[in-house]
Image: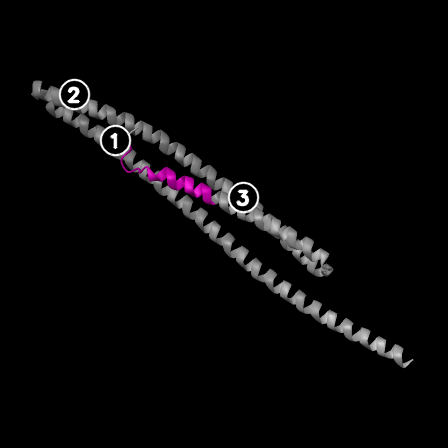
Amino acid sequence: MATPVGWSQGGSGSVCLAFDQLRDVIESQEDLIHQLRNVMILQDENFVSKEEFQEVEKQLVEEKAAHAKTKVLLAKEEEKLQFALGEVEVLSKQLEKEKLAFEKALSTVKSRALQESSKKDQLITKCNEIESHIIKQEDILNGKENEIKELQQVISQQKQIFRNHMSDFRIQKQQENYMAQVLDQKHKKASGKHQARSHQRTREK
C-alpha cells in the first residue's frame, strides 16, 4: 500500500518504541520490588530493629501500590494508542482506495476532455470535489498522528516521574543503611567497654 500523504513510515516505528519503553518501565519497577524484598531479608538477618523493618515493609507496600497504578496507567495509554493506530490504518486504506479512484477518474477525465469539450467544466468540478475530499482525509490522518505524539509524551512524562521517585527512594535507603551501620558500631563499642569493666571487677574480687 502506498504511503498516505501526511503519514510517514516512521510513525509505526515510534509507536513500537513507545511500547518498548512502557515495558522497560514495568520491568524496572518489578526489579526494584525484588531488590526491596532482598533488602528486607538482609536487614532481618542482621537484626534490624522492628521499627526499621516496618518502615521498609511500609515503603515496599507503597512501591507495590505505585507500581500497580503505573501498570494500569500504561495499559490505558497502550489501549488508546492501539485504538488510534487502528483508526489510522482504516483511514489509510480508505485514502489509498480513493487515490486509486481519483487517478482512474482523472485519466478518464483527460481522455474525455479531448472528445467532449462540452463536459469539460462538469468533470473538472468533480475532480476538484474528489481532491477536496482527499485533503480532508489527510487532515484527519494528521490529527491522528498528533494524538499519538501527545500520548507518547504522556508516557515519557510518567516514565520520568517514576525515575525521580526511584532515585529519591534509593537515596533514602542509603541514608538509612549508613545510620544503621553507625548505630551498630556504637553498640559494639559500648558492649566492648561493658565486657572490659566486668572483667576488671572480676579480677579485683
- In which quarter of the view is residue 45 placed? bottom right
Circle 3 residue: 71
Residues drawn in magenta: 3-21
**Seen in the image, is 104 located left or right of residue 21?**
left
Q: Nearer the viewer, residue 47 or 71?
A: 47
Residue 42: x and y, percent?
68, 55
In the figure, is residue 188 to the left or right of 109? right
Q: Residues within 10 Å of mark 3 (few under 14, many from 20)?
A: some
Q: Secondary structure at mark 1?
A: helix
Q: Quadrant of residue 130?
A: top left
Distance from Cα at disc 2 to Cα at disc 3: 55 Å
Q: Residue furthest right?
A: 205
Q: Mark 1 Cα within 10 Å, few/some/many (few <14, many 20+)?
A: some
Residue at the bottom extreme, as displayed = 204
Amino acid identity at mark 3: Lys
Crowd class of label 2 (few under 14; some 14 to 19; many from 20; radius 10 Å): few
Name the kind of residue labelled 2 in the image. Answer: Thr
Q: Within the magenta stretch, is there residue 15?
A: yes
Magenta-colored stretch includes residue 148: no
Q: Nearer the viewer, residue 114 or 170?
A: 170
Query: In the rendered image, which residue does mark 1 sit on?
Result: 133
Asked if the residue under mark 3 is in contact with the one under mark 2, i.e. CB atoms within 8 Å, the reply is no
Query: Which disc is residue 17 wearing?
Result: none
**On screen, residue 197 above or below 37:** below
Q: Is 41 rendered above or below residue 188?
A: above
Mark found first going from the N terminus, 2 or 3: 3
Return the residue at label 2: 108
Image position of 93 with respect to 175: above or below? above
Q: Earlier in the sequence, mark 1 or mark 3?
A: 3
